[in-house]
Image (tube, grey):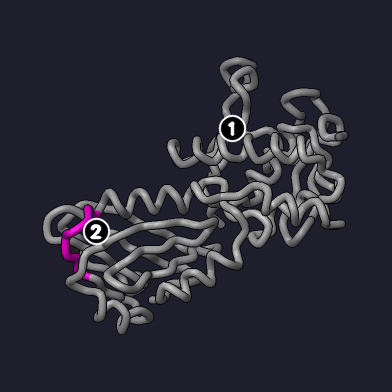
Amino acid sequence: MPEGHTIHRLAKDYAAAFPHGIPLHVTSPQGKFSDAAALLTGTPLHTTEAHGKHLFLRFAADWIHIHLGLFGKVTFGPAPAPPPTDTVRLRLTDADTSYVDLRGPTTCALITDPEKQAIHDRLGPDPLRPDADPDAAYRRISRSRTTIAALLMDQKVIAGVGNVYRAEVLFRHGIDPYRTGRDITPTEWESIWTDLLALMHEGVRNNRIDTVRPEHTPQAMGRPPRVDDHGGEVYVYRRANRPCHICGGEIRTAGLAARNLFWCPTCQKN
């Protein structure tokens, strides 16, 4: 499932593809969004916004709410658009410049302002949003007996963090993923939040997740670059049973909150 930086990048890319004021042709070749598409076609894309893993596209008074889920994909291309396949849930096109296809999302729905606000209300603060309040997340974390690893994946606590950022930020701060939230100090939380802010903004800029510090890059360490379909240089994510870049010990993995957790028992003792 895409992490929050991907959704914020998509919001920027949609806005760049369709500058404000250009009427768009909105279709649903798959048919599941046809009624809403018929209402929107001929209107411009007004605003794009992301909160965690939720993408919002505003047309006139209503919003398209998109959640990619595990299988959703977005494809950008130049005009003229090719004939759409019958797997495209939503296609946006303009007359001269661009088209964007959405396939396989968990959610693609036309919603009102109050319905959109209800989604924001149930999500935790998103480090990539200017309105994010890290103290709101910490209030929930500091009262919880749940592990910090599980809390970081809970979108009601903090929105946009997925399995990669969860594993990597805990490693970068030497924190045992099984510590409970109430054992995380205010200073530790401030460091985690600040680091997530920097890492996720870098993810938006580069459209990939890189979490290793300059002294631990392949060039600095004389090691081969990571080869993985997720891309990016990381410390522990999907590196189970391989040596830690820092201590040389074995990276471990275990199931936690329905996802695979990765960590270094030697480096993450705090």
Numbered disc 2: secondary structure: strand
Q: Is residue 109 above or below residue 10?
A: below
In the rendered structure, which amino acid carries the disc numbered 1? Glu
Q: Is residue 242 above or below residue 57?
A: above
Q: Quadrant of residue 175?
A: top right
In the rendered structure, which amino acid carries the disc numbered 2? Tyr
Total numbered labels:
2
**What is the x, y in percent for residue 249?**
83, 28
Bounds of the magenta segment: 18-25
Q: Which mark is residue 99?
A: 2
Residue located 68% across and 48% down the image: 135
Distance from disc 1 to disc 2, alpha carbons, whole Å, reads: 32 Å
Indicate whether residue 123 is drawn in magenta. no
Q: As drawn, which residue projects farthest toward the bottom? A: 35
- On the question of residue 241 being in view, the answer is no
Indicate whether residue 23 is drawn in magenta. yes
Numbered disc 1: secondary structure: loop
Q: Pick whichever, 222 or 157, lies toward us.
A: 157
Q: Which mark is residue 233?
A: 1
